[in-house]
Image: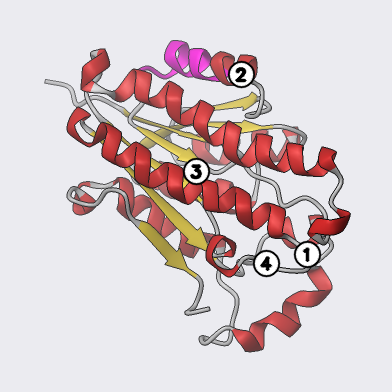
Amino acid sequence: MATETKVALVTGGSGGIGRACAMALAREGYDIALTYLENRAGGEATAETVRGLGRRALALRADTAVEHDVLAAFAAVDGALGRLHVLVNNAGIVGRGSRVADLPVELLERVMAVNVVGCFLAAREAVRRMSTRHGGAGGAIVNISSIASRRGSPGEFVHYAASKGAVDTFTIGLAKEVAAEGIRVNAVRPGMIDTEIHSKAGLAERVPTIVPTVPMKRIGTAEEVADAVVWLVSERASYVTAALVDIGGGR
């Protein structure tokens, strides 16, 4: 009997942690669907690299904060790749730095829409496909949070930290809600990781000043985050759900 091909969807897979997760899962035998918003070239490059590993790949433009886009992306995965086994809820933004007293509502709304609403929407669609209650065969969801959720990021990124705090709470609640339906839900909370997200947030020049505050005295890599994601979705973590795994060098 032929073994069913495993399928993973990685939101925000055009670069950084999302790209690393897509590559790591492809090496584990998953066919990969990924979403991107602005970086089409990055999304297509990730997909092409996945194909070079002998796996099927689908790059989809989607704003994960927009329900229509999320529905269309999941429908495309259904049609092109088949049953979904894994969702990596990675799409997220930091937004520009601001003290709360100076925070524009437009910035707050966008960060919350992408990081919180988008996470909910993608997880909802995954549950509808994976849950034994809905006729599915189970699966695993990993939400990408941040250690900012427990540090608070005062003076610059409280809005981002609060959005990731919501992701943490969502992870725990959803995990308990669907634990008896064949779905495990966990989160990883990266700390200072070497990706382009810092330059987008205007923080590139601050990275060297932050390194001394990390007990391990270095920043992490996207691949180190991806390794944790791969473990969490694997059978080696079959009794792990509602976990928040910090990947921050002890910071």
Q: Give the Cα distance between marks 4 and 2.
A: 29 Å
Magenta segment boundaries in residue numbering? 73-82
* Residue type at the position of mark 4: Ser
* Residue type at the position of mark 1: Glu
Check residue 153 in the rendering and tell me which mark sits there, or answer none: 4
176 within the magenta span? no
Q: Earlier in the sequence, mark 2 or mark 3?
A: 3
* Residue type at the position of mark 2: Glu
Q: Are marks 4 and 1 in contact (CB under 8 Å)?
A: yes
Q: What kind of secondary structure does the magenta stretch mostly adopt?
A: helix
Q: Earlier in the sequence, mark 1 or mark 2?
A: 2
- Graded by Cα atoms within 10 Å as few (under 14), some (14 to 19) or many (20 or more), the crowding at tag 1 reads some
Residue 87 placement: quadrant? top left
Q: Earlier in the sequence, mark 4 or mark 3?
A: 3
The residue wearing badge 1 is 156
Q: Considering the numbered disc 2 on the image, is that residue within a helix, a strand or a loop?
A: helix
Q: In the shown orientation, is residue 197 left or right of residue 239?
A: right
81 within the magenta span? yes
Check residue 67 in the rendering and tell me which mark sits there, or answer none: 2
Check residue 22 in the rendering and tell me which mark sits there, or answer none: 3
